Image: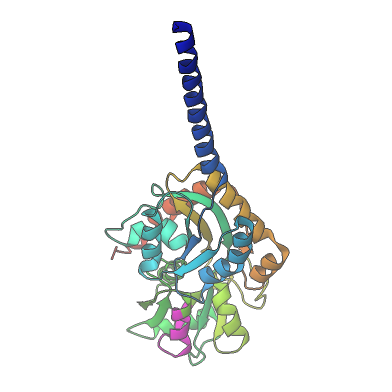
């Protein structure tokens, strides 16, 4: 009797153990293989129409097709990209929210804004570096200058300084303007907008006189004659605007700024998800049609590993913190 009773109990224990093991396997399989399980929110730290938005809209459809879920672009400009960054930092660490960020919100903002709701090193997991591209110094056609030296001379003749627009307080465009005015020893009145497109609109309307714009925003306007290009901020000339000199060769030796973009997710996002996003965004950025479209706008795709991007963010964070302190730029 005891023997017969023990057999059903053993069978029940084995069945329960099998069920537990199956449940564990199913859970692990779901975590590693089911991503993504819903549409992905692709937050762009600028208004529609600028460089960040251009990269997101070029890569988004390819990544969406590869992942089998829609990437919904959510443009969140303002505060130099800090609004978009804070939304991403506070999102669930499940890979369903991705930030299309840049030098501003990933390396600079803590040095120029008070009370940020995120930290660029601690609160994100890097996915991949996206593109590299310097800014283009352009002026409104009514500004009577054709060279950097003429612009500097004009600025020195204006007691109140020239009016410079920028895509955000901590943006690469604003930093380029600050570095330019510091090295040229001139005064500028800075006006900040919620992204590259609104800043460009202000320049074209004559609301501002100059801007350090992303190539994707500046090149169409320069080629159409609606704005005048003076120089690029990189150490070498742009293949898309070979007639424009660098600022370094125009009288300010050593001048250089890079307007880079990259993708990040919330900290503590599982490694498998980060690797999947890294692979798909990397393939999209290297796709011949997308790569050529980016290069035509002066943006050079340069995807890499999450670790490499993390190290680069840290180095840029430290570099610009030092420059901002030395230039005496005060946090807002």
- The residue depicted at 60 percent of the width and 58 percent of the height is 68
In this rendering, is residue 22 above or below 213?
above
Q: Quadrant of the N terminus?
A: top left
- The residue depicted at 45 percent of the width and 12 percent of the height is 5
Q: Nearer the viewer, residue 276 or 322?
A: 276
Q: Position of residue 73 (x, y in %)?
A: 50, 68
Q: Is 210 in the magenta?
A: yes
Q: Nearer the viewer, residue 70 or 173?
A: 70
Q: Is any atom of residue 256 visible in this view?
A: no
The colour scheme used to paint the residues is rainbow
Q: Residue reaching furthest front?
A: 1
Q: Residue reaching furthest bottom?
A: 142
In this rendering, is residue 4 above or below 327?
above
The stretch in magenta equals: 198-211
Q: Quadrant of the C terminus?
A: bottom left
Q: Residue reaching furthest right?
A: 288
Q: Is any atom of residue 82 visible in this view?
A: yes
Q: Position of residue 140 (x, y in %)?
A: 49, 88
Q: Is 158 in the magenta?
A: no
Q: Nearer the viewer, residue 277 or 221?
A: 277
């Amino acid at each position: 009797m005891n023997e017969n009773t023990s057999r059903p109990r053993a069978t029940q224990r084995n069945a329960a153990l099998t069920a537990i093991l199956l449940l564990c396997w199913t859970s692990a399989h779901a975590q590693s293989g089911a991503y993504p399980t819903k549409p992905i929110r692709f937050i762009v730290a600028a208004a529609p129409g600028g460089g960040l938005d251009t990269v997101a809209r070029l890569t988004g459809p390819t990544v969406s097709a590869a992942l089998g879920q829609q990437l919904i672009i959510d443009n969140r400009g303002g505060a130099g990209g800090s609004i978009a960054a804070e939304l991403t930092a506070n999102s669930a660490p499940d890979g369903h929210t991705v930030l299309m960020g840049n030098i501003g919100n990933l390396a600079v903002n803590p040095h120029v804004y008070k009370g940020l709701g995120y930290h660029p090193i601690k609160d994100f997991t890097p996915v991949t570096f996206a593109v590299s591209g310097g800014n283009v110094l352009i002026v409104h056609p009514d500004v009577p200058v054709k060279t950097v030296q003429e612009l500097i001379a004009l600025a020195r003749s204006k007691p109140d300084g020239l009016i410079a627009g920028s895509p955000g307080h901590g943006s690469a465009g604003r930093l380029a303007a600050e570095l330019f005015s510091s090295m040229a020893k001139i005064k500028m009145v800075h006006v900040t907008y919620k992204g590259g497109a609104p800043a460009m609109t202000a320049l074209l309307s004559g609301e501002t006189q100059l801007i350090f714009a992303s190539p994707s925003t500046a090149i169409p306007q320069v080629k159409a004659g609606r704005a005048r290009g003076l120089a690029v901020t990189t150490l070498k000339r742009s293949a898309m605007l070979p007639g424009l000199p660098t600022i370094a060769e125009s009288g300010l030796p050593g001048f250089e700024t890079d307007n880079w973009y990259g993708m990040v997710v919330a900290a503590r996002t599982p490694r498998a998800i980060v690797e999947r996003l890294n692979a798909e965004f990397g393939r999209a950025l290297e796709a011949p049609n997308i790569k050529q479209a980016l290069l035509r706008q002066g943006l050079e795709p340069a995807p890499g590993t999450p670790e490499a991007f993390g190290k680069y963010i840290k180095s840029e964070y430290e570099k610009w913190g030092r420059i901002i302190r030395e230039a005496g730029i005060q946090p807002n």
